[in-house]
Amino acid sequence: MTAMMNVRGLVKKYPGFELKGVGFSVEPGYIVGFIGRNGAGKTTTIKSILGLTSPDAGSVELFGLDIREHEIECKQQLGIVFGEFCYYQDKRLRTITAVYKRFYREWDKKKYCQYIEKFGLDESKRVKELSSGMKVKYSLALALSHNAKLLILDEPTSGLDPVSRDELTDIFRDIVSDGEHSILFSTHVTSDLDKCADYIIYIRNGSIIMQGDREEIINGYRLVQGRLDELTPRLEEALIGVKETPFGFTGLIRADEAYLAEGLQSAKADIESIMVYTEKYENHEGSEK
């Protein structure tokens, strides 16, 4: 089956920042979490994919087609949701929809009405009257109503309350459940990905440093805790970042080296802890003291 997206060797240079040969793919039926701290290169990558900025090198294929050569055809099958809602605040939803649908050959009015009802949206409301969660749901309703096969979401849950975020992750799982849709989900709210992502891509300082099946990634690490006198030099060297307090230490270790922490308290890692300890280690060139 053809991949929804193939990104190969994307390079984009700015003063003080460079996207360094970014490459990954998105397969049908998957939610791919794209993580990294603010400024790591997530939005630059997405803008380069969509042609909103011109990469200095690399290529992007969507649905087996080079997007630069088949931009209109590719974008007919894309649904795009940004965290920032950029529509006119005083416009009613029905007015925005009437303009939006003109750009898509396969606009499905019936499907649109179903999503409006499902999301509890009132088309007579103005944009400024919507909550942050309702704005994201409206963007999703638009994105899903022209038979888009691939959704690209850039920080869609940023600023939402926990209940709204949980509701949206359920919606995302439902969208891909037919095996014919996929989602590239860029976020720094990693707890959302623990609920819904199948695959993780981790970008830091413009480079992909980790990617793979979410369960395989988190099963590859353990969090360990102990007293300071139990932090031997050999164990400290193996830890990927370590946080010390007057009461002891906590650190991240690869599962295949967990034998070095035998006898200490340990727990399964999650995406957030992997990211936090990796960033601390890399940023301080050693353990946090």
Image (cartoon, rainbow, N blue to C red):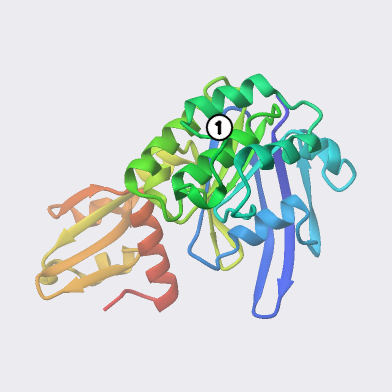
125 with respect to 167 (left or right)? right
Residue at left offset 33%, top offset 56%: 273
Residue at left offset 51%, top offset 39%: 137
130 vs 242, nearest the viewer: 130
Residue 31 visible at all:
yes
In the rendered image, the vertical position of residue 209 relative to residue 66, given as above or below? below
Which quarter of the picture shows residue 51?
bottom right
What's under tag 1, amino acid-wise?
Answer: Tyr
Q: Name the quarter where the N terminus is drawn.
A: top right
Disc 1: which residue: 30
> Residue 95: where, in percent of width, then height?
68, 40
In the rendered image, the vertical position of residue 264 relative to residue 80, given as above or below? below
> Residue 37: where, in percent of width, then height?
48, 63
Which quarter of the picture shows residue 79?
top right
89 vs 40, nearest the viewer: 89
79 vs 141, nearest the viewer: 141
Residue at left offset 70%, top offset 57%: 47
Residue 285 visible at all:
no
Q: Name the quarter where the C terminus is drawn.
A: bottom left
> Residue 209: where, in percent of width, then height?
54, 58
In the rendered image, the vertical position of residue 64 relative to residue 44, given as above or below? above
Which residue is situated farthest in the right direction here?
A: 69
Q: Secondary structure at mark 1?
A: loop
Which quarter of the picture shows residue 169?
top left
144 with respect to 190 (left or right)? right
How many other residues sit within 10 Å of disc 1, few (<14), some (14-19) or many (≥20)?
A: many
199 with respect to 191 (left or right)? right
> Residue 232: where, in percent of width, then height?
19, 69
In the rendered image, the vertical position of residue 12 relative to residue 123, given as above or below? below
Residue at left offset 74%, top offset 33%: 77
Q: Total label count?
A: 1
